[in-house]
Amino acid sequence: MFSFNKKTKGLIGIACIDNGVTLGQCAWSNGLYTHPKLIRLERNPRELTSDDWRSAIHDTGLSGSDCVVTLPPSMINHQVLRLPEMSESEIKEAASWEMSERFGIDRNKLQSEAIRIGSGGDVLALSIELDELECILEPIYAAGLRPIKVEAQCISISRTFSMLHRRQSDQGKVRSLFNFGLHDSSFIILDGDSMVFYKQLHHKQAELLSAIESHTGVSQNQAASMLEEARFDGGESAICKAVRDATRSIHEEITTDIMKCLRHYGVTNRGPLSTCIYITGKGGWNQFLGELLTTACNQEVCVDMQASHVSQLRHETLSVPGWHAVLGASLATLSGKPSRRGEDHQLKEAA
């Protein structure tokens, strides 16, 4: 059973994300991350050798050999399926055949997983070709590491934002999460520590940068600097205005898609509705997107660092791309079963 009062040291987390790899490790103590260590490798994970992995582990001071690898939608196929009520083994079997047929890959050449989400019969099916998986894992094994789990990036990120929602009394506390990456994005709804909605979106930070480049005539590096300048209130007004004008249509599209997701969830699930939207990822927070979402969705919209356990992390940790996936992966072996705490008086009385 997961304990909020004891220190828990995480495994090594490895996230293939945003054109590179982020490695890290953290511990969890009394509701906070402790001793996070991260390193970023701006290299294609398929090109990394065992020496590269060993050097990264040594340079960062990560300990142990057990690790958890988390992979993005560009490597793992995602598909939300509507399946009838059946056992877990039958769900996995049906999802495996469905993914094989949808992507035209021999079922025996796929590694598949299926996760029931929400109460409307939806199942998140995940699959990866075995050859692709071996390409990633073989150098990791050769470096002396022992991958004990491979999971989708959305699972790792959801865990990061559920660390304070694992009590039984937290079930029913519904939050949304817009993960905005360099080349992909997704919208997730969490009920307690359970994922109850998932939608892969086509939006990506690269589109914002291209829009700023074409609108202002600057280089890609300059566009990235302008986008960073405009993330929060207080930036130079001329730059903020240029970024707002260049990205308005993209932010409006994002807002429309998120509203559709919230509406779909409200129709297909009988549980409580989302009360807050967190924005995370490399594309991450932007004041203009935040304003549009706040108005359109009629709920609180927050930058990821406003989560109480995340706000305690240092800037150098939060500035590493993929930190949210790596910290979630590092703590992947913590029990997923809700636990009780002393303040859950109604549960204690019921027991």
Image (spheres, helix red, strand yellow):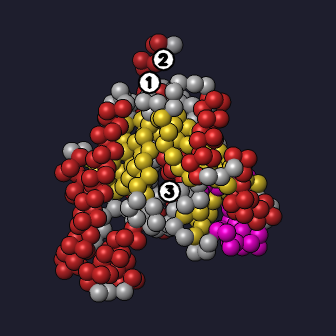
Is 31 colored magenta in this rendering?
no
* Bounds of the magenta segment: 45-71
Q: Distance between the residues labelled 2 and 3?
A: 34 Å
Mark 2 near mark 3, Cβ–Cβ under 8 Å?
A: no
Residue 50 location, quadrant: bottom right
User: What's under tag 3, amino acid-wise?
Assistant: His
Q: Give the answer, above or below, for where 8 lies relative to 205.
A: above
Residue identifier under label 1:
344
Secondary structure beneath dot 3 equals: helix
Q: Do the residues under discs 1 and 2 have CB atoms within 8 angstroms?
A: yes
What label sits on residue 348 in the rendered view? 2
Up-down: is 309 above or below 116? below
Report the front residue among 155 and 29. 155
Q: Mark 3 points at which residue?
A: 324
Numbered label attached to residue 20: none
Q: How crowded is mark 3: few (under 14 residues within 10 Å), some or many (20 or more)?
A: many
Q: Residues within 10 Å of mark 1 (few under 14, many from 20)?
A: some
In percent of width and height, residue 186 lies at 43, 53
Q: State the image quarter where residue 25 is shown.
A: bottom right
Left or right: where 211 falls relative to 153: left
Which residue is depicted at the point 22% across and 58% down?
Answer: 291
Residue 151, visible in the rendered structure = no
Q: Disc 2 residue type?
A: Lys
Mark 1 vs mark 3, foreground winner is: 3
Residue type of the residue flagged with mark 1? Asp
- Alpha carbon separation for disc pair 1 and 3: 29 Å
